[in-house]
Image: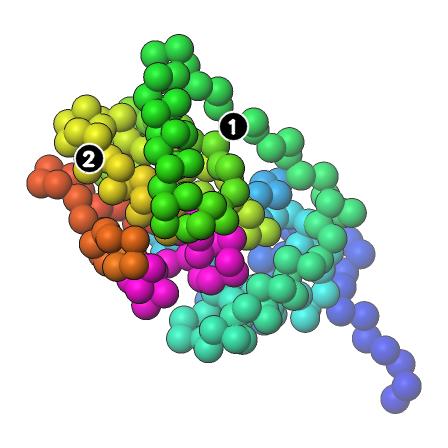
Amino acid sequence: MPDEIELAFNLDIAPEQALPERLYRLGLAPGTPVTLTRNRVQVLSWHVRDGLRIHAGYAWAPDEVLSAILRYLAPRVPRAERLAARRRFLGFPLDRYVKSRARRPLAGVSERDAPVVARLERLHQILNARHFAGSLGTIPIRVSDRMQTRLGEFRADLDHKPVVITISGRHIRRDGWTVATETLLHEMVHQWQCETGIPVDHGPAFRRKAREVGIPPAARAPEGYIPAPDRPGTIA
């Protein structure tokens, strides 16, 4: 009958099982690996080798939301369109359909690292007052000896809220506090981007602010460090 409506889903297939085929139908390259997660902080990520990692709650999302995800991931999309797509898929109530994995609490500060972290926190206060008029919020600062390819990094969640600044312990010991302070200030510029709604990247806004606060407008690592690509939500 002409007025019959053909249902776009199969009740014999669980929504999570059907999600990859729905994404392929909407434009994801056929055969791209699709991994479902319960990670509420990082609801999706893309890597050429590993494919798409996506929160399982999106299996219940309408095609409009899935299309927004693919638009967000597509190359050469105008910034305004990308931001609109991001707002669309982040607005979907994932936890209504699939309970997210409990967020792992931020690791505490070890007794060994406590004096170094205390000094970094004090430096953050001083640099905040000197270069940002005290406008930056308090943020956890950690030291990591596992950072082999980075001097420091700033991490925010997908709701654009700062999570942590991490500085390489190896970097501090090897290069000294003068250089480490410059690294901290570099990450604080990323914090400033995040808190003011500017894209967190190394683009023109970052370079202008870096020059303003007196640090090199490009990331600079001493000889012996190998650059690594940024993880979603994290930038060096």
Mark 2 lies on residue: 178
Towards the viewer: 189 or 47: 189
Towards the viewer: 24 or 231: 231
Compared with 134, 82 (above or below) is below
Q: Earlier in the sequence, mark 2 or mark 1?
A: 1
Other residues around mark 2 within 10 Å, as few (<14) / some (14–19) / many (≥20): few
Residue 178 seen in the current view: yes
User: Which x, y percent locates residue 111?
Assistant: 39, 10
Q: Main secondary structure of the magenta part?
A: helix
Q: Is residue 174 left or right of residue 151?
A: left
Compared with 83, 150 (above or below) is above
* Distance between the alpha carbons at the discs numbered 2 and 1: 27 Å
Compared with 137, 19 (above or below) is below
Q: Is residue 202 magenta?
A: yes
**Residue at coordinates 80% horizontally, 56% vertically from top-left?**
11
Q: Is residue 199 magenta?
A: yes
Q: Secondary structure at mark 2?
A: helix
